[in-house]
């Protein structure tokens, strides 16, 4: 209903958190760097699963404090939080019964960090949302992306074609049935009220997949808003391109077949809801050498431009392997708040 969408319309500013096993590598693997996106390092450096799994045994972020992060977001004026429940690496940052490759079963930390963040948000009055990679999954031999080899990406391939080279044999349906759909179901059932769910990079999903996920979300959480990167026109609100700041909002955006699964640009927004997800430096995941930070002034300007157009600014932070948001990033976000 209008009432349940009102918060999004008024939110303006939110915090996105990219955190996973890639955060431990901090943008480097052996002699190589990761490129722009540290969370893509697995496919950029073609790290074998046997090696990548070992990162889980070293995941022990003793400085992670959900309450501190949420309070920080709140102090910065942010109204909602979006956390990577599972990024393309396939590692669940919550206690999944569907797959042991998760933060509780596969790490010495054994804490459900997603649950802790959810709790902290409810306590501090922030809306809580999840990011979930519903197509790409590099830990699953039938993970999506194997049809898109011709399209350039941030790594060497969209799918894991070093552990699982036989792209012709891959079947996303199998991954969807055994992992994707049941994981989304447990997320919807086990973490209280989700205000939104943020899907990403729809390049393999057919209409039936997007529709099935859309219906699943609405079945358990009718008020949970779905972003447009679920694919195939199944969405409640429109995610613009990463870091996209448009001149204006067209009032005649049409949903053409060709742009249905495009990441950027305008699609018609049934309830007039828009959001731009953006980074403070270049990478989403923690990258030790990426010090290309935007200034507080730049961020404040972008925020003003977007909010003036009624577009929410979902600004990303990438905690490190110990669970800390980089000091420089925190300094900038604190200063942005002073411009309001
Ligand atoms: C995707 C992810 O691959 C990336 O790791 C990160 O999670 C980001 C939020 O989303 O990458 C994209 C998606 C869309 C665009 C660029 C990168 N785009 O619209 O230009």
Image (cartoon, rainbow, N blue to C red):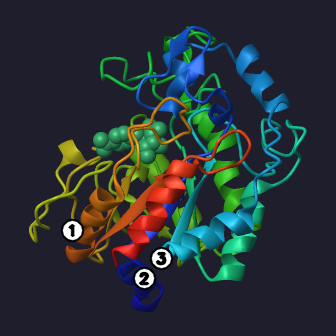
Q: Tag 3, which secondary structure?
A: loop
Please state the horizontal and vertical placement of residue 289, each as a whole percent of the image: 50, 29
Q: Residues within 10 Å of mark 1 (few under 14, many from 20)?
A: some
- Residue at image x 64%, y 11%? 163
Q: Position of residue 208 (x, y in %)?
A: 45, 48
Quadrant housing residue 205: top left
Residue sitting at x 87%, y 44%: 109
The total of numbered circles placed on residues is 3
Disc 3 and disc 1 in contact, CB within 8 angstroms = no
* Whole-number angstrom distance, CA of label 1 to CA of label 2: 22 Å
Where residue 191 is drawn, which disc sits there?
Answer: none
Q: Nearer the viewer, residue 176 or 337?
A: 337
Sequence order check, earlier mark of 3 and 1: 3
> Which residue does the numbered mark 3 point to in the structure image?
77
Mark 3 crowdedness (10 Å alpha carbons): few <14, some 14-19, many ≥20: many
In primary-sequence order, the first of circles 2 and 3 is 2
In the picture, the disc for residue 305 is: 1
Residue 224 in view of the camera: no
**Proximity of marks 2 and 3: CB atoms separated by less than 8 Å:** no
């Amino acid at each position: 209903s209008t009432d349940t969408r009102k918060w999004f319309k008024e939110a303006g500013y939110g915090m996105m958190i990219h955190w996973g096993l890639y955060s431990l590598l901090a943008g480097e693997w052996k002699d190589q760097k990761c490129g722009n996106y540290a969370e893509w390092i697995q496919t950029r450096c073609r790290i074998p699963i046997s090696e990548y799994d070992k990162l889980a045994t070293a995941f022990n972020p003793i400085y992670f404090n959900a309450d501190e992060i949420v309070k920080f977001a709140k102090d910065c004026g942010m109204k909602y939080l979006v956390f990577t429940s599972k990024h393309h690496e396939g590692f669940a940052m919550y206690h999944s019964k569907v797959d042991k490759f998760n933060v509780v079963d596969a790490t010495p930390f054994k804490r459900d960090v997603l649950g802790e963040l959810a709790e902290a948000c409810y306590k501090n009055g922030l809306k809580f949302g999840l990011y979930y990679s519903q197509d790409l999954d590099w830990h699953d031999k039938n993970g999506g992306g194997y049809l898109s080899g011709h399209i350039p990406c941030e790594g060497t391939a969209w799918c894991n074609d070093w552990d699982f080279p036989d792209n012709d044999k891959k079947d996303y349906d199998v991954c969807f049935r055994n992992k994707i759909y049941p994981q989304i179901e447990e997320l919807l059932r086990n973490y209280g009220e989700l205000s939104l769910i943020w899907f990403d990079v729809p390049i393999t999903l057919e209409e039936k997949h997007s529709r099935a996920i859309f219906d699943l979300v609405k079945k358990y959480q009718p008020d949970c808003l779905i972003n447009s990167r679920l694919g195939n026109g199944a969405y409640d609100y429109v995610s613009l391109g990463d870091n996209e700041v448009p001149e204006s909002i067209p009032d005649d955006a049409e949903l053409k077949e060709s742009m249905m699964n495009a990441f950027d640009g305008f699609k018609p927004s049934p309830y007039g809801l828009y959001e731009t997800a953006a980074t403070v430096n270049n990478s989403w995941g923690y990258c030790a050498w990426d010090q290309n930070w935007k200034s507080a002034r730049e961020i404040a300007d972008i925020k003003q431009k977007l909010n003036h157009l009624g577009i929410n600014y979902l600004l990303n932070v990438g905690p490190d392997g110990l669970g800390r948001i980089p000091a420089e990033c925190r300094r900038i976000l604190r200063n942005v708040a002073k411009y309001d």
